[in-house]
Image: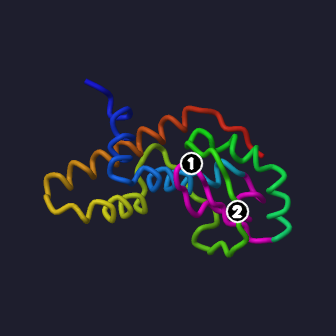
């Protein structure tokens, strides 16, 4: 029998939600991956097929980040990011700030997000199975990431 960590990525891919799951993980870890002031002026917005769109709140930072784009990709490669595009835009207050470190637990926000994903499933038993699978996959990825050392900017 295969471990759930090996099965879930293909399941998420088949359901078309793999990028959404990974983007959510990146957003939750953004302030750990990148220290201030970098994390205060940037925020991940969209992920599609390994291409991450990062919003930058100042033109000066936008120009600076283009010079260190490869370092960004290197830091985010463990999430499957292969390309990064920086775009000027507003970073909303609820996206910024200190996010509490999660000790391999699912946050309330993640629970709500999972509920939003599975609400389209009509069969209650299948819905419950999917909720559990997604939760276990997020815990698995969090554990894997927490076990690896990340260098800081």
Q: How many marks?
A: 2
Is residue 43 inside the magenta stretch? yes
Above or below 79: residue 115: below
Residue 28 image offset from top left, x and y in percent:
54, 55
Is residue 34 inside the magenta stretch? no
Please report the residue visible at 59 percent of the width from the left and 68 percent of the height from the top. 95
Residue 94 image offset from top left, x and y in percent:
57, 72
Residue 126 image offset from top left, x and y in percent:
17, 52
Per the rendered image, the range of residues in magenta is: 35-58
Q: Residues within 10 Å of mark 2 (few under 14, many from 20)?
A: many
The residue to which callout 2 is attached is 42
Mark 2 touches mark 1? (CB < 8 Å): no
Above or below 94: residue 44: above
Work out whether mark 2 precedes mark 1 in sequence or the reverse, and give the earlier one. 2
Looking at the rendering, which quadrant does residue 77 occupy?
Answer: top right
Task: Please give left or right for residue 15 compared with residue 87 in the image.
Answer: left
Front one among 18 and 27: 18
The residue to which callout 1 is attached is 50
Indicate the secondary structure of the residue bearing disc 1. loop
Indicate the secondary structure of the residue bearing disc 2. strand
Task: Please give left or right for residue 123 compared with residue 30 in the image.
Answer: left
- As drawn, which residue projects farthest toward the top? 1
Looking at the rendering, which quadrant does residue 89 occupy?
Answer: bottom right
């Amino acid at each position: 029998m295969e471990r759930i960590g090996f099965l879930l990525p293909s399941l998420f891919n088949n359901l078309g939600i793999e990028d959404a799951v990974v983007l959510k993980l990146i957003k939750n870890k953004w302030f750990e991956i990148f220290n201030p002031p970098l994390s205060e002026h940037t925020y991940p917005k969209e992920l599609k097929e390994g291409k991450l769109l990062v919003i930058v709140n100042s033109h000066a930072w936008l120009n600076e980040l283009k010079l260190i784009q490869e370092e960004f990709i290197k830091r985010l490669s463990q999430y499957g990011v292969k390309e990064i595009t920086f775009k000027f835009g507003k970073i909303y207050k609820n996206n910024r700030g200190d996010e509490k470190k999660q000790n391999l637990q699912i946050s309330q926000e993640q629970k709500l997000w999972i509920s939003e994903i599975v609400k389209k499933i009509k069969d209650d038993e299948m819905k419950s199975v999917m909720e559990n699978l997604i939760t276990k996959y997020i815990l698995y990825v969090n554990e894997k990431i927490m076990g690896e050392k990340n260098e800081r900017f």
